[in-house]
Amino acid sequence: MRWGRVPVDITTTPRHHVDMAHTPPTRRDYALDMLRRTQDNLDQLARDEENAVVSARLHKVTWREIADALGVAQPNATRKFKPAVDAHTGQAPYPDGPSALSVLRTVRPRRKELERTRVADIAHARTAGVEWKDIAAVVRMATPNAIAKFRPLLVEKTTVTPRDDL
């Protein structure tokens, strides 16, 4: 008898007792992991954006300059970020206003690219059989909102193949 691992019957052993390290990920798992990574990158970008706005304001950069760097209207920038600026305590995350504005100028193209990647990841997930409720959970939206936002961006095709018994 070989020493080492004892064979486990996964049909009768509770899942938490099975060594899952040897279970290869499915296409569905892989697709959801890709979507999670993209969503994490979008979340990090939002944190970077907020830190740069807070820093810019602490260095006396005007809301107009911040809005211009972000490519949005000044009232929208103020409405979105003023609560974070008001709540901030401590030092500015960036050393000066120009550094913060430089970061803000990169946010829009980075977000656009990540949004494209997220749609591609959602298409991949749907192709792999991931349900909308699981996608919605990853992108932190209610299922109907995720469907309304992303389904129009996808092209769903029906594939018809001959039966195997022919």
Image (cartoon, rainbow, N blue to C red):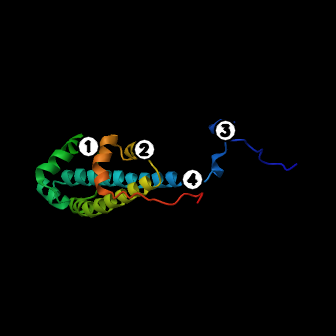
Give the structural element (helix, strand or loop) at label 3. Answer: helix
- Which one is in front in this view, the residue at disc 1 or the one at disc 2? 2
Q: Which residue is mark 3?
A: 17
* Total numbered labels placed on residues in the image: 4
Name which residue lies at 22% across and 45% down.
85
Asked which secondary structure carries label 4, the reply is loop
**Residue type, label 4:** Pro
Q: Amino acid at mark 1?
A: His
Q: In the figure, 31 relative to 143: above or below? A: below
The quarter holding residue 120 reads bottom left
Regarding mark 1 in the picture, which secondary structure is present there?
A: loop
**On the rendered structure, is 76 left or right of 29?**
left
Residue named by callout 1: 88
Seen from the viewer's position, the closer of residues 123 and 161 is 161
Return the residue at label 2.
134
How much space separates mark 3 and mark 1, taking CA atoms?
A: 46 Å
Pointer 4 and pointer 3: residues touching (CB < 8 Å)? no
Sequence-wise, which precedes: disc 4 or disc 3?
3
Q: Is residue 92 visible?
A: no
Q: Where in the figure is residue 31, as x and y percent of width and height?
A: 47, 55
Of the numbered discs 3 and 2, the one sitting upstream in the chain is: 3
Dot 4 and dot 1 residues touching (CB under 8 Å): no
Q: In percent of the image, x 43 and y 54: which residue is there?
A: 125
Residue corresponding to mark 4: 25
Q: Residues within 10 Å of mark 1 (few under 14, many from 20)?
A: some
